[in-house]
Image (cartoon, rainbow, N blue to C red):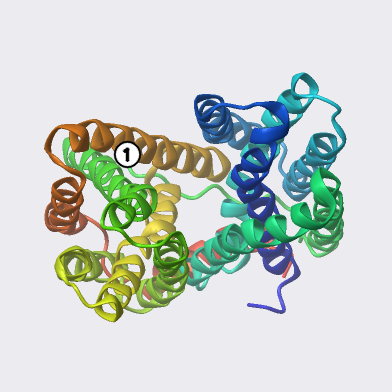
Amino acid sequence: MLRNRVFTAVVGGHFMVDVLNSIGAVLLAVLAGPFGLSNQQIGLALTVYTLLGALSQPLFGWIADRLVGHTLQLAAIGVAWMALCYTGVALAPNWTILLPCFMLAALGSGLFHPIGTASAAAAVPDRPASATSIFFFGGQIGLAVGPLLAGILLGIAGRAGIVPVAMMALVPAGTLLLAQQTARSRRSGHTAPLPQRRLWTKLAIVLLLAFIVLVVVRSSIQTVYQSFLPKLFSDRGWEPALYGALAGTFMASGAIGNVLNGWMADRLGMRIATVWPLILSVPAGLACFLATPVWVIFIAAGLAGMLVGGQHSILVLHAQRILPVRQGLASGLILGFTFASGAIGTWLSGMIADQIGLEQVMIGMTLLGLPAAALAFTLPGRTRPAAVAEVRAGLQPETGR
């Protein structure tokens, strides 16, 4: 898998895209004093940035589906666009110029993600779940590295410290262009057949609706954890360094969970790789909120992150297979829908927490893992060898292997 140039190129691109995505919050926190930014302004800027990146993904996925043979070039443009915009953020003389540069950077992320997701699975058709999980692992590591790197560079050089990070993005952009040339040189000269789509029936519609609800519930659980773990333990009197480390533990273990669940899905099927982790996430989450020893809370948070966060790549892969559209649009639709539904779930949870308490809301969200697991029984089991061979035959001309 790691000798596949297309696959390694999109994973490297994902890492760098999410490094840039993750420095926004640190950057705006640093600029709050010099530019006189309020919490409301910072929150609004980050929310609009997220929505621009999420809601543009279906459109860019649709465009990529119509430019077959140029998808990695588009992904390279997305990475280079983010490098250009963040360079503008670093050099902008005032907030009026900085804000548009920051917002426009989100479109580069929106362009890259659906193409990268579809390309990762297509590049390794015999192990699509593992390939997709490693692709998202690269992005999550970027999300973890970005704030640390930005904090160091901003502390040393101020906003100008963002420039070398932005320039680093040109490396994966160039790698993606080289991978596109490799893919073209190895194509067999004929167009790959489109995968066969089953006719929509009432049962298929029911299964699709169950899948949509599953995505909404699981995404909301994960996003609520990410958003409110620091606040919950801050309310309990923990120091920022300690609850920051707890939130980092949850995020890092989610990245590991993606890889483990991808491996499990390739061998045992999506159903087992989703149902059991969601069931086991309930006692892990409850232990995190109800235990008192710090070491138990950290272990429980790590287990909860691994079990809750591990299904992201699997559900994206399943959406690519069942939606009656091409892979780029399917990837854009599921990613945009996942991020948007998680944001809405977090917003609703925050409103309810103001009425009944944050701990009660967190416990309630954890218990939603059980109905989510029930919905996951609608996912497919282990893929038949014949089906894998059919996917390989249909996608290999596009992989560049």
Residue that extends furthest to the top in the rendered view of this protein? 96
Q: Quadrant of the C terminus?
A: bottom right
Q: x, y (%) of residue 308?
A: 30, 62
Residue 295 in which image quadrant: bottom left
In front here: 155 or 390? 155
Is any atom of residue 200 visible in this view?
A: no
User: Residue beneath label 1, please?
Assistant: 346
Amino acid type, label 1? Thr
Q: Is residue 122 left or right of residue 162?
A: left
In front here: 263 or 48? 48
Q: Secondary structure at mark 1?
A: helix
Q: x, y (%) of residue 320?
A: 45, 49
Figure disc tally: 1
Residue at x-position 58% and y-position 57% = 143
Figure check: 121 above or below 264:
above
Q: Is residue 186 left or right of residue 226?
A: right
Q: Quadrant of the N terminus?
A: bottom right
Q: Is residue 150 left or right of residue 247?
A: right
Q: x, y (%) of residue 233?
A: 30, 58
